[in-house]
Amino acid sequence: MPDTGESVSVSELEDRELIKLCRGNGSVKEQAWEEVVRRFRRRVFGIAYKFTGRYEESQDLTQEIFLRVFRSLDKFDANADFGTWLYSVSRNHCIDHYRSGRRERESLVQHEVHLEEMASGRFDPYRAVEVRDKREMLLKALSGLPDKLREAVMLRDIKELTYQEIVEQLELPEGTVKSRINRGRLELGRALVAMRNRSKRANGING
């Protein structure tokens, strides 16, 4: 392994050696991390841009992802491929970002609807509770799906990407993508039915 003292040229190190320095406490730690960012920034930005389609938002996401990666380096398996792990962390962060943003937009829209209904005297508090409960149930059911199925369903049914866009984003064959979406929808439907049945039993409702 190359010398890891002050005179080390981090640009010549392999990814695994760089990460080892980043996880250490040596004086070269900062240089090693800067090299990691330089080496992988374009790849991470590309992942973020596929999700957002906006340059500035992708830049912000890229910074957030690298911060998240740096804070999670102690969880990285030193025997694994760093590039693969980084891709997974980046993609998951982008999905979380999109889901969070969507919830905020839905909340704003729902709030505006409620204001309009109250202003016109048409506000129905019972319907508002029903809508909220259904949304919470859906989110809970989604969170219970296996990661691969949840990701496929969210990209197709929530983010509304085309099959081809999902194929490119996940780098999987179209048949695999469609299979995951179909399986995810089926498991999601079963989970929702089970949750509704439990809710009915808890409230003493039959049928």
Image: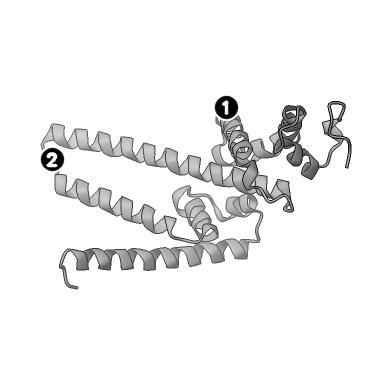
Q: Observer-nearest residue: 39 or 80?
A: 80
Quarter of the image for the N terminus: give it: top right
Q: In the figure, is residue 171 to the left or right of 193?
A: right
The image quarter in which residue 194 lies? bottom left
Q: In the rendering, at what x and y percent does residue 169 appear?
A: 62, 49
Q: In the rendering, at what x and y percent does residue 75 appear?
A: 62, 47
Label 1: how many residues lie within 10 Å, few (<14), some (14-19) or many (20+)?
few
Quarter of the image for the C terminus: give it: bottom left
Q: Residue at x 26, y 68 (%)?
A: 197
For badge 2, the amino acid type reads Arg
Q: Residue at x 80, y 42 (%)?
A: 17
Q: Observer-nearest residue: 76 or 90?
A: 76
Q: In the figure, is residue 35 to the left or right of 105?
A: right
Residue annotated with mark 1: 56
**Figure disc tally:** 2
Label 2 to label 1: alpha-carbon separation: 41 Å
Q: Earlier in the sequence, mark 2 or mark 1?
A: 1
Q: In the rendering, at what x and y percent does residue 160 appear?
A: 48, 49
Q: In the rendering, at what x and y percent does residue 59 appear?
A: 60, 29
Q: Residue at x 15, y 44 (%)?
A: 125
Residue annotated with mark 2: 122
Work out which residue is located at the far bottom of the displayed protein and give it. Answer: 207
Work out which residue is located at the far left of the displayed protein and give it. Answer: 121
For badge 1, the amino acid type reads Glu
